[in-house]
Amino acid sequence: MVYKIADNVTTPLGGTTEENLRTVVSGGSALRQYQDYEGIPEAFTASLFSKEQRRGMQEEGLTPFESMVVASVRKALEVSAIEVGSERVVFILSTTKGNIALVAEGGRDEREYPGVSARRIAERIGVRTAPIVVCNACISGLAAIILAERLLSGGEYDYAIVSGADSQGKFIISGFQSLKALSAEQCRPFDEERMGLNLGEAAATMILGRKKTQEGQWTIGAGYVRNDGYHISAPSRTGLGARKAIEAVIEGRERGEIACVNAHGTATMFNDQMESVAIEGSGLGDIAVNSLKGYYGHTMGAAGVLETIVTMKAIEEGTVLGTRGYGERGVSGKIKVQKENGKTDKTSFVKMLSGFGGCNAATWCSKEERAEMMIGKRATKTTHRVRITPGTVEVDGEKIETKSTGREMLTELYHERVGDYPKYHKMDMLSKLGFIATELLLGAEGGERFVDREDRAIVFFNRTSSIDTDRHYQETIADAGKYFPSPALFVYTLPNIVTGEIAIRNHYHGETSFYVLAERDEEMIERVVRVTLRDEATQSIVTGWIDYEDEERFEADIRLEEVERWEAR
């Protein structure tokens, strides 16, 4: 359990949390329809910053994306007393695409790498420690909060600055249009007439600390990430991953304490249906459920942070926010969707999100304090290790001879060592690299394969995110005369898809997470893995470095770690 010290929400509705809350409580929204935006041929509805708002946030020497994050962080820091430059402060950035607009300029710009962008932001706000980027599709913001809680509860840092942000443009908008996921009208979460999602821009920041600084602070309890192991872009029909995440969060807690479940509620046909089944299945069907997408749209990397903060502020005022756009229930799960603003005297809620790659996350927020977790760690042993570069393959230190090199070598390894999974051929190169490395790793482990299990996590790190696929997707939208955005490519522009592919192949339903660093940092990797293992359901973890920049520059260096015992500090 950790404490919220300060926050900020910066959106088209306003530059402070208070401005946003007042507008949302009154039913306001920044969603509006756009036509001929950045050369996109189809109309769409979204919540986007105005040119004046962008100019007001712009920082000299930083990109527009970096500037909006700095603007939000500074406002949060103004009302906190933390020493930003301390070695006990960590900056965690949640984003799905960061400076993706730079890809359209061609060439090779390191600012395209989210970890490099996070480092530039950290330097501007005065943070001296290495930043961490959570790049876990739509659950990124909530996954970032969960990581912060783990790092602080585990004693790794005293304070965490968690900021979530994404900037919308041709790359992202065209991709969601290619998936037929966008609604031309304002979205209607959980409604029988829902037609799709709206996108949104925002930057939201939460400053968390290990120690209580005043009475009545919000606390963040342990959070959990679970995978459907079903499909990389469609949610499980049974809501398996989301239900497991919720059940882990509410175990041992009184359901009567819960004011609401703040859901993802994207207004897409299958996401809302899945969430309803998961909520009902976890025993929360009689608790108020709401979605904030009708006010802000889907803000992607910002969603988990923004929606958690706004829900906290509303509950402080005794309000459960209504679900803007909702009229009649259009999902089979028997849930209690909050249509209009309602009153509550409860001071706890469950926050949940779901995303591509089969990932699902949930956490508990409350003004009720509970005993903190024991500070310690679960000792592990590395049982197997695999390393792949364009010219070498090693399993447990032994070299595997191949006839080819580069990307052809991966195909050779597939045919020689796997050969029974045709889905491999549709994967992007980052996923192929991770898939082959994991197949070799699990082959070295031996034992029974393809059995449902929740006790194994997949946690990967890299530097370049999904840059190779990003560049290939950009080619499908660069020429107005040959404009044909590829949905098959777009879904792979999320680096965490590799963890989803592995979870599906192996029937894993434990945690799957993807982090991006400015540089390969073994100490940071070990720190994140150490706190990930605070989830007691995890008994083993496939983890390490998976990076694919191009066919001449890639590396997989992954290992299998098994939990041995708990070591108190």
Image (cartoon, rainbow, N blue to C red):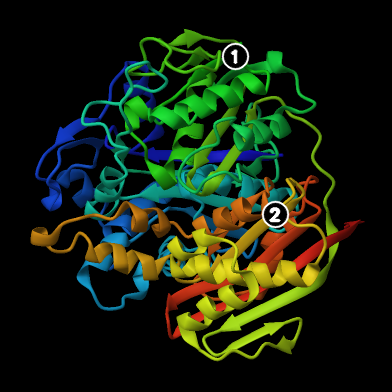
Q: In the image, is 489 to the left or to the right of 494?
A: left
Question: Residue at horizontal 64%, vertical 91%?
Answer: 401
In percent of width and height, residue 264 lies at 47, 31
The residue wearing badge 2 is 457
Near mark 2 (Cα within 10 A), the count class, few <14, some 14-19 or many ≥20, is many
Compared with 110, 512 (above or below) is above
Instruction: Identify the amino acid type marked 1.
Output: Ile
Compared with 443, 197 (above or below) is above
Q: Which mark is residue 355?
A: none
The residue wearing badge 1 is 287
Instruction: Identify the amino acid type marked 2.
Output: Ala
Compared with 222, 314 (above or below) is above
**Distance of label 1 from label 2 (alpha carbons):** 30 Å
Near mark 1 (Cα within 10 A), the count class, few <14, some 14-19 or many ≥20, is many
Question: Residue at horizontal 62%, vertical 50%?
Answer: 148
Question: Residue at horizontal 56%, vertical 49%?
Answer: 144
Q: Which of 109 and 432 is in front in this view?
A: 432
Q: Earlier in the sequence, mark 1 or mark 2?
A: 1
Q: Can the viewer see residue 114?
A: yes
Q: What element carries label 1?
A: loop
The nearer-to-camera label among 1 and 2 is 2
Q: Nearer the viewer, residue 558 or 260?
A: 558
Question: Residue at horizontal 57%, vertical 43%?
Answer: 230
In percent of width and height, residue 105 lies at 21, 70
In percent of width and height, residue 260 lies at 56, 19
